[in-house]
Image: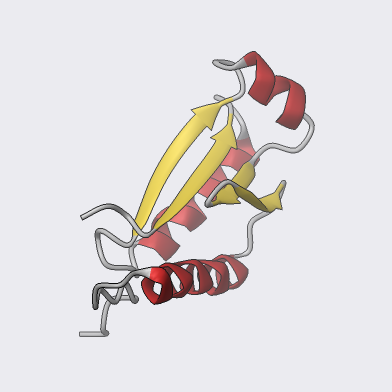
Amino acid sequence: MDAVATLTIISKPDCHLCDVAREIVDVVVADYDEDAVSVEELSILDDPSLYDTWWEKIPVVLIDDRLHAHWRLDAARLRTALDAATQDAATQDAATRTPSRKEPA
């Protein structure tokens, strides 16, 4: 099954704020079903167009290719945005797939 939402972190090596953002993403995404959120990380050093667009704003977090945050990432705001992204996708999906957060144990 394909992921319902795609979260992209745009960063670079040796970037403290990027490390913090990555940690927040890891913690928040862990609350979702395994197939609900796909996470990819891109470095501005590997892509000149990413560098030109984002070098002053890293870390940058995109959800489904839309800007969610730059510089500082808030876990609660990220959770709210991922809830919306996964619910929007579930609503558009004709199947009964419900990509919600994991139920507490």
Q: Residue at x 33, y 68 (%)?
A: 32
Left or right, 86 with reference to 54: left
- Quadrant location of the C terminus in the rendered image: bottom left
Quadrant for residue 36, please give it: bottom left
Task: Indicate the quadrant containing the N terminus: top left, top right, bottom left or bottom right.
Answer: bottom left
Q: Position of residue 93 (x, y in %)?
A: 34, 69
Residue 26, x across and y down, in percent: 40, 54
Give the residue at x 47% y 55%: 25
**Looking at the picture, how far across and down is residue 71, in whole percent?**
72, 46
> Looking at this view, is 87 or 74 the one in front?
87
Indicate whether 16 appears above or below 95: above
Judge by depth and name the residue closer to the eye, 26 or 94. 94
On screen, residue 11 above or below 82:
above
- In the image as oriented, which residue stretches furthest toward the front? 94
In this picture, is 1 found above or below 43? Answer: below
Question: What residue is rendered at 48% in x and 72% in y?
Answer: 88
Looking at the picture, how far across and down is residue 75, in whole percent? 56, 66
